[in-house]
Image: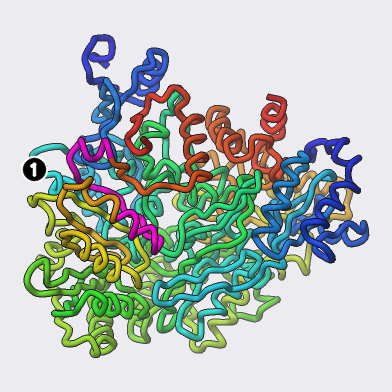
Amino acid sequence: MTKLAGASATLSPADEAEVAQAVKQAAADRTPLEIMGGGSRRGLGRPAQAGRTLSMAGLSGITLYEPGALTLVARSGTPLAEIETALAAERQMLSFEPMDHRPIYGLSEAGPTPTIGGVVAVGASGPRRVQAGACRDSLIGVRFVNGAGEAVSSGGRVMKNVTGYDLVKLMAGAFGELGVLTELSFKLSPRPEIAATLRLYRLEDARAVAAMTSALGSPFNVSAAAHAPATLDGEAVTLLRLEGFADSVAYRAGALRDRLAEFGEVEINDDPMDGAAVWSEVRDVAPFAGREGALWRIAVRPSRAAQLVAVISTHREALAYYDWGGGLIWLMTPEDDMAGARILRAESAKIGADAVLVRASDAVRAAAPTFPPQPEAVAALARGLKAKFDPYGVLNPGRMTP
Amino acid sequence: MRMPTPDAEVLARRADIVSRLREIAPGEAVISDPAELKAYECDALTAYRQPPLVVCLPENTEQVAAMLRLCHEMRVPVVPRGAGTSLAGGSLPTADSVILGVSRMAEVLEIDLEDRFVRVQTGVTNLSVTGAVQDEGFFYAPDPSSQLACAIAGNIAMNSGGAHCLKYGVTTNNLLGVRMVTMQGEIIDLGGPHMTEGGYDLLGLICGSEGQLGVVTEAWLRVLPSPEGARPILFGFESSEIAGACVADIIREGVLPVALEFMDGPAIKVCEDFAKAGYPLDAQALLIVEVEGSEAEIASQLAAIRRIAERHGPIAIKESASPAESAAIWAGRKSAFGAMGRISDYMCLDGTIPIGELPGVLRRIEELSEQFGLRVANIFHAGDGNMHPLILFDANKPGDLETCEAFGAEILKLCVDVGGCLTGEHGVGVEKRDLMTHQFNPVDLAQQAAVKDVFDPLWLLNRGKVFPLEIFESRIAA
């Protein structure tokens, strides 16, 4: 850890013991740390109020991969691409389809390298969440260093484990505020032999959500459902994905087409290039990459999604598309008036939706809470946990909680 | 086994506590008659018994909140209870505790198939959730063997699994939200009717916390569309090694069955005697593999699985030919514990191992069986490595229970030593709390105890469970 002793702003530990030592020192000095994997998701949450960066890039590598047990363990700084390559060689995958945040932040592929630790810290889950769950559902074990500089283990490498409290879930999506992730275990899925995308055209938002609901309520095991309204691209398109063995996908595609006949003609495309392209666009929010404007991610009951978008649009300029069968809205709106936070929060609160500000200038993110407000009793529990896990407030302070 | 020493002051104030609880919920909701309290002296871990101070069966969340507020104010320990089917002693009372049972809160509150969730009071049984939606073509996925009796409250407390979680996950993967009352009597919602975002994942923390962080009174459960059909196939093998290799091959080939169950020779015999399911009695290992889909999909998946299995030379293959045969195959598996109970007292373990370790672990269990002089039957969720060794003993024979417990502890330590864990779906309860130091070091345990400190600083909720008693004692002394 060459840089630890010096006055450099970046600490680069090489293993968990060095992470623990760095955090211990930071706790002693009361010097907050910004914890960084590859740095591709720094735009998420609020800017950490930290003087020093703790780079996790040195903790890299897959430590265990058992294809026959659908289990992988990797150090947190391991590039996501390295893991995906290893899994592809065994025709397996991370089932939660982690999003790549670089496109929406204008970062190139030659720029910051997404790491598995970053994926877990922000809980990055993609279109397959409707079928296979979120990042936290695939995560079966963590090792982390708490704010006192102690290494802690929870969960393990087996997929069924209820031994002790589930700190694994707690660490996923905590934005590094409760601990520095050092090692992560996942349960995996077989990579489907083929995927087919079904398309319906020219549906109004509410009608599209109804079509997606019908598909997701069918026995045909739909693995993703998204809708881009006409406002986005000129022609509205509703997308449904089926995955599995070729015979089975062909059968289900036909059955689903029949089921959705009332919504119009269904186009079926099982060209792998088409599927890979369109679903990575949905996953990575390609429609709003490279465009000016604040970006919101709103989790909502699908049946209320179209109405929420309509109401917001009466108040301010907004473009939106739907993932998770309507359970997730990606909404872009101008940055003025705090990115519309007041309207979005008020309208979301009315129907129990959660609006997260995903992209905005540092100034807006520092001033407006990026995460939805919590009732005081819940916020008090969160504060209590933060105080126990990070008693000196040195881990990513302010990143999630102001 | 030692439990926390009852608080003499609480015992002395019993009459006062009972009358104040009756102010909150009059009539039959508060049980204080010693004869009736006997019914609550244990759960399905019947080896340990202790009647509680009083039992409360509130009718709604507000009463739960008022009762917890009162208990907090009067410093009375509380033991939450669902249906009392815990195999780990998760709702074993202490003499100074109030049992807070949710059995009278058993309504399905809302069914929304458009948004694919059901909201229930947590006293409902697991099976009744599916019952509420199956006519519309939906089901609730987690399916513990006790699903006819066990309550959603206990499923959430223990993060219950079942035979079909290889495909569908366990309770935590199918739980969208909870309404929970804290020990201080505050009612909070975590998660809700949809996949929520933002803030620490407190919902994930609550699920599996064994009733030590709050009392969950309502839950939003994800329901899934029922498959068009499902069918199991049976394979008998000459040895556990061969069966284990077959399991790994099935998974590696990318076929993900909905269930992949394993039984060893002794388990096969007991279950076959009971259920007449057509299990091969000459086999030393049995696999039940179930797949789902349309007729054609089932046929093609079963053919693929058959091809893989045939490479391992099965001595018996039996594909279910009718719904009645499928039901019998599952009846044999799901009644395994009951069937075993007819021939002997037994203790059911629940450790999980990495599935590659199966043959070695089974060999070692056999050695230990000889060493301790007690017989074992093994039932195993093979796809996910969750073992259920059943140790047979005679409760009327002095010393047998103790020998059985010592044997069980050795098996669980073995599970941990090969990279697994103490419990895959039953929970720690009182049964495994003293083994926690084998899986976790003091720092790991202190971090978990810190969570308890945040939610329940006085450690009033479900004392004597999960943590070794020394940790509990040091925390309440602090």
Asked whether the viewer can see residue A1, the reply is: yes
Q: Is residue B347 left or right of residue B200?
A: right
A74 vs A3: above or below: below
| Stretch in magenta | A344-367
Query: Dividing the picture into quarters, in which one does residue B168 lie?
Result: bottom left
Please provide percent x and percent y for residue A184: 37, 41
In the image, what residue occupies the spot 25% across and 65% down? A309
In the image, what residue occupies the spot 62% across and 67% down? B145
Which colour scheme appears in the figure? rainbow
Q: In terms of depth relative to the viewer, which is nearer, B396 or B317?
A: B396
**B3 in the magenta segment:** no
Please provide percent x and percent y for residue A277: 12, 62
- Disc 1 marks a residue whose amino acid type is Ser
B337 vs B6: above or below: below
Please provide percent x and percent y for residue A141: 43, 43
Please provide percent x and percent y for residue A390: 45, 28
Question: Which residue matches tag 1?
Answer: A108
Q: Is residue A232 left or right of residue B161?
A: left
Quadrant, the N terminus of chain A: top left
**Mark 1: which secondary structure?**
loop
Asked whether the viewer can see residue A325, the reply is: no
Q: In terms of depth relative to the viewer, which is nearer, B199 or B381?
A: B199
